[in-house]
Image: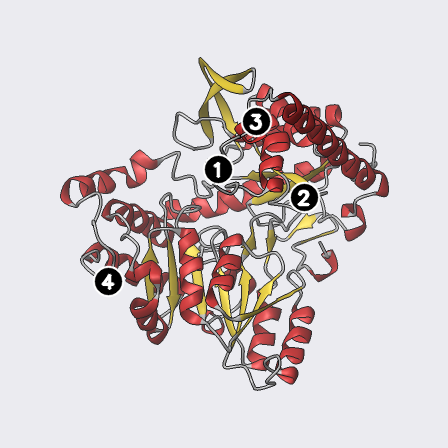
Amino acid sequence: MDSSKKKKTAKNGVHTNGHTYAPVMSEEALEVSQFTELTTYLGFAVLIVAGHLRDLYARLTGRSVWTTLKPQRNKKVAPLFKSWENFYYRRIFHRIGDVFDRPVCSSPGARLEVVMRERRGTDLVTTGETRELVNLGSYNYLGFADDWESTCGDTVLRAVEEWPISCGSSRSELGTTTLHRRLEQQMAAFVGKEDAIVFNMGYGTNSTTIPALVGKGDLILSDALNHASIVNGCRASGAFIRSFPHNDAGGLEAALREAIALGVPRTRRPWKKILVMVEGLYSMEGEICDLKAISAVCKKYKAYLYLDEAHSIGALGPTGRGACEHCGVSPDDVHVLMGTFTKSFGGMGGYIAASAQIIDHLRATCAGFVSHDAMSCVLCEQISTALTIVEKSDLGARKLRTLKDNSNFFRSELIKIGLHVYGDYDSPVIPVLLYNPAKIPAFSRECLARGLAVVVVGFPATPLVKGRARFCVSAGHTLQDLQDAAAKIKEVADILKIQYAISPFG
């Protein structure tokens, strides 16, 4: 991450709200040492070599729990999986399956209950026990999972009785109800756009909207670290795609100048339109978009700007209106605002907010509206109620302040421990670099033993050498929760030697 290009919200250890926090880590402090990088590659090499030796033994002897490794004399079809994908799952991912597949048996609030399991042979078997953990992994930014009964419960339960659970149709046919239109109008007003359209799936919002906006003869300039839903939507569009350096307005301008000067490859004709795609808050980096500089570049070169606010809407800005409010950018300078309802509003699905002309076009051409099932009326009521609380009540304002204070406090505590912490202050997503593949499952298991539920992420969701833990802080956490969690994480850091900001050896 290029820290020199980030907008700093903390300098000399003093945050802008007056509280004292650890300063944002410098680029040098976050740079992985050669020793750490070497041992990380060595760890993967050992896993891969050992895995291939086990595969060789299985194929020679026919003794394996994996069907793909057993002799198949009557094979009549091609393998369903590519060899590397199957190998990676078989010899790397499957060995740490307990880290990723922990069944939850409660609401995903600041605390949750998980079903305990143990490995028996190659299988994970439930023990019949449950355990309460402090939840540092769920997208519950405003804490609606903690106080749902007193905030949204009554209105949502009334909707269950008054409206169907499923509309049984797409939005373009019989799936649009007054609840859908009310939510769309409410969302458009909240983010400062003329109109909005809601979808039943956040991932599908990007992957179906982008092909409806751009196509052959168009150019997409996409941030190098954009989410997979954006990547797949871009690929499905048929447009020409180029990436620019992550969160780098200078890199974007250079790419735009080159694209405009050279035009369409081979024909050199001008592009029909250029669409720049960025995220408000990058979910694997915890980094806030440099939106003011990027929007200025787009205005200068007359490019359209598409902003994915999946993690920033309801989480950034004094009133929760997302990256535009946080960065001081007018919504008019962003042509398409996309967001989801899963992170801050306790629901599911996504939305596109834009001009009335763009929304009318999407209603006629976007597969997510024309063909996909409509969002449940019950979910519309949940999201609408939560949005009203955020926008108009003192409780919503308190939730936003608490989320910001909790996020900044926890980030500061992790930095003080000496961990490599990615991202910006005010971000509720706080990634901590673990690097070595053996330390990824070890970190999760040690935290579980201390009563913490954490999310760890590795390749291919991250670069090979940048496996990490990703903490998600919420307004439902108390200061005591976060203090205790930081103390326990320090214990784990001492055991695993991951205090890379102090020494490459921990």
Measured as percent of width and height from the top left, residue 99 is found at 57, 28
Write down the residue under mark 2: 21
Mark earlier in primary sequence (4, 1): 1
Residue 450 appears in the figure: no
Which mark is in front, 2 or 3? 3
Is 202 in front, or is 8? 202
Mark 1 and mark 2: Cα distance apart in space: 24 Å
Label 3 element class: loop
Write down the residue under mark 4: 172
Which mark is in front, 1 or 3? 3
In screen coordinates, is 387 left or right of 67?
left
Which quadrant holds the N terminus?
Answer: bottom right
Mark earlier in primary sequence (2, 3): 2
Write down the residue under mark 1: 138
Is 68 in front, or is 146? 68
Mark earlier in primary sequence (1, 2): 2
Label 2: how many Cα within 10 Å (few below 14, some 14–19, many 20+): many
- Report the amino acid beneath label 3: Lys
- Report the amino acid beneath label 4: Ser
Measured as percent of width and height from the top left, residue 475 is found at 47, 40
Measured as percent of width and height from the top left, residue 391 is found at 36, 54
Q: Quadrant of residue 145?
A: top left
Is 138 in front, or is 209? 209
In screen coordinates, is 81 left or right of 205?
right
In screen coordinates, is 464 left or right of 17?
right
Mark earlier in primary sequence (4, 2): 2
